[in-house]
Image (cartoon, rainbow, N blue to C red):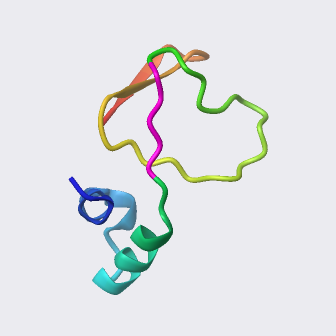
């Protein structure tokens, strides 16, 4: 699945035009993380927006899982 396709499926971007989605996809950077790797921690300065394309993420504070 391309980044553009993933963004089109994401409810957060549903109000954007196709052109806006394409512009976001142009600057997006795919990242791959190993199981157990920390992506960010509470208190970190927000510098990125993370959109989960596949897999799952665990919030260790609440033990809540977020799945793609």
Relative vertical location of residue 10 with respect to residue 21 in this rendering, above or below = above
| Image position of 41 (left or right of 67) | right
Residue at (36% x, 27% y) in the render: 56
- Quadrant hosting residue 25: bottom left
Q: Position of residue 36 (x, y in %)?
A: 51, 14
| 33, 11: nearer the viewer | 33
| Image position of 49 (left or right of 15) | right
The magenta region covers 30-34
Q: Position of residue 39 (x, y in %)?
A: 59, 31
- Magenta span contains residue 31: yes
Q: Position of residue 50 (x, y in %)?
A: 51, 47
How many numbered discs, if any? 0
Residue at (24% x, 58% y) in the render: 9
Relative vertical location of residue 68 with respect to residue 56 in this rendering, above or below = below
| 46, 34: nearer the viewer | 34
| Image position of 28 (left or right of 41) | left
């Amino acid at each position: 699945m391309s980044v553009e396709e993933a963004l089109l499926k994401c409810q957060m971007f549903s109000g954007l035009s196709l052109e806006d989605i394409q512009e976001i996809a142009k600057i997006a950077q795919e990242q791959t993380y190993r199981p157990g790797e920390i992506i960010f921690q509470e208190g970190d300065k927000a510098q990125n927006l993370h959109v989960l394309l596949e897999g799952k993420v665990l919030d260790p504070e609440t033990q809540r899982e977020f799945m793609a």
